[in-house]
Amino acid sequence: MSTAAGVRVGIIGGSGLYQMPELTAIEEVKVDTPFGPPSDAFIVGTLEGERVAFLPRHGRGHRLTPTEVPFRANIYAMKLLGVESILSASAVGSLQEQYAPLDMVIPDQFFDRTRGRVRESTFFGEGIVAHVSFAHPVCGRLGDVLQEACGAADVKAHRGGTYLCMEGPAFSTVAESNVYRSWGMDIIGMTNLQEAKLAREAEICYATLALVTDYDCWHPGHDAVSVETVVEYLNKNVRNAQIILREAVKGMQSGERSCKCGSALQHAIFTAPNLWPEATMKKLEVIIKKYAS
């Protein structure tokens, strides 16, 4: 692994967002983790005077399905690089009329509809048990930063709402879409729930910038999700997302990390340190070492 000194901010790019053109002084950094390789090599560079680690969630060229994304490796690698805050961009469908295609949503809640035996959502197990608080899964400080940054792009932004995370890779049926609407869900995607849980366990601040590409399949005027339409709106959203993320990085420089994300494990590890298996402790060292005594 190359040395990427001074990296505090991580950006995860979703469908269509495979690069940040404003990054300068770029180096490609490959990171090895106990959970296997991340989705791709990190692109580490300078953005608005801040060293940033950028990772394409699905790999360059979009090679990984949502289920295949190595979520644990991605977040663990961010931790190894020194990242304290992650801004995650994600393409989503809208489940409510007020979230129109090309809008941006900054959700503050998640609802899990993925298959737990397929997707790993925790670093713990193998002799060390932890139960983190996840009532409020998004860092409020980062949410504020993203909301303010949306003013730099000519977009309509919505603060708050629930992101339903489905398994995929196929889109919803009409029946599923209508049920999710009846539950009060706001937007639907396939990736961010696992990232948010793992970031909390790694004591990294996390927030989502959701790029609305379509009305899913419930809307009377959109009886099926057209892949062509999704791609068209996705391409339009990507540039706006790049502008917003650049402004967010700039905005993060002026504030202190005053949230509780950095101490999420303080009372969450139930297993006494003297009982931690050596192999598991070594595997999770970058996350739990400060609680080892």
Image (tube, rainbow, N blue to C red):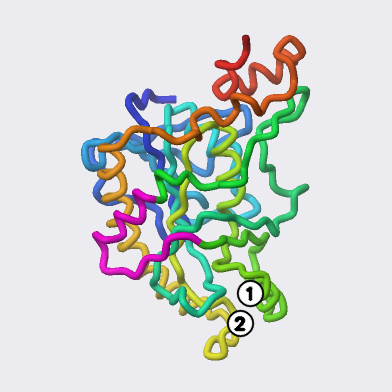
42 and 163: which is toward the camera: 163
Residue assigned mark 1: 181
Numbered tag placed on residue 265 in the rendering: none
Residue assigned mark 2: 218
133 and 215: which is toward the camera: 133
Q: CA distance from mark 2 to mark 1?
A: 9 Å
Q: Is residue 97 above or below residue 26?
A: below
Few, some or many residues within 10 Å of mark 1 (<14, 14–19, 20+):
some
Q: Is residue 6 above or below residue 209?
A: above
Residue appearing at x 67%, y 60% in the figure: 167
Horizontal and vertical percent position of residue 293: 62, 9
The three-letter code of the residue at mark 1 reads Arg
Q: Is residue 106 left or right of residue 265?
A: left
Choose top left, top right, bottom left or bottom right for residue 270. Answer: top right
Mark 2 touching mark 1, by CB under 8 A?
yes
Horizontal and vertical percent position of residue 44: 34, 36
Residue appearing at x 43%, y 33% in the figure: 84
Horizontal and vertical percent position of residue 176: 70, 74
> In the image, is residue 158 part of the stretch drawn in magenta?
yes
Q: Which residues are magenta?
A: 144-160
Q: Quadrant of the N terminus?
A: top left
